[in-house]
Image: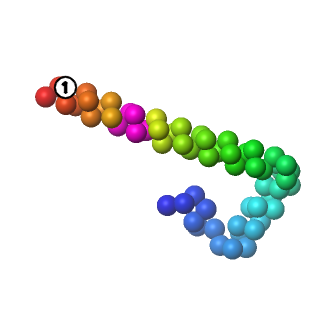
């Protein structure tokens, strides 16, 4: 489920306007890029953790 799925159209517009005011137009692409990289690293870490847990479970049998 998306983090912004619970926002209606007007609320989403307010969030975007607030982000523009706080971070500035030139900083938003950098922020979005860094958030995307962080999400990718988190998913990679979770997958590695699940693999390690499966190996540990298999070796204990």
> What secondary structure do most residues of the magenta stretch adopt?
helix
- In the image, residue 13 sits, relative to residue 59, either above or below, namely below
The type of colouring in the image is: rainbow
Q: Residue 52, how many percent across, how many down?
A: 33, 30
Residue 21, given in percent of the width and then of the height, sits at 86, 55
Magenta-span inclusion, residue 23? no
Nearer to us in this view, 18 or 44: 44
Q: In this view, does 22 lie to the left or right of 40?
A: right
Left or right placement of residue 53 versus residue 36 in this view: left
Q: In this view, does 10 lie above or below 32?
A: below
What range of the chain is rendered magenta?
Answer: 46-50
> Which residue is at 70% across, 67% downward?
12
Residue 40 vertical placement versus 9 (above, below): above
Q: Quadrant of the C terminus?
A: top left
Identify the residue at horizontal 35%, vertical 37% (top origin). 50
Outermost residue on the left side: it is 61
Binning the other alpha carbons within 10 Å of mark 1 as few (below 14), some (14 to 19) or many (20 upward) gives few
**Is 42 left or right of 46, judged from the image as shown?**
right
Label 1's element?
helix
Total labels: the figure holds 1
Residue 48: image x %, image y %? 40, 34
Q: Find the residue positioned furthest to the bottom.
A: 9
Residue appearing at x 40%, y 39% in the figure = 47
Report whether 1 appears left or right of 31: left
- Place of residue 37 in the rendered image (x, y in percent of width and height, measured from the top left): 61, 41
Could you tell me which residue is drawn at 64 percent across and 45 percent down? Answer: 35
Residue with the mark numbered 1:
59
């Amino acid at each position: 489920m998306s983090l912004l799925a619970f926002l209606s159209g007007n609320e989403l517009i307010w969030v975007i306007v607030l982000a523009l005011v706080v971070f500035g137009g030139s900083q938003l692409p950098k922020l979005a890029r860094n958030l995307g990289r962080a999400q990718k690293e988190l998913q990679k870490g979770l997958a590695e953790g699940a693999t390690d847990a499966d190996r540990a479970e298999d070796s204990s049998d």
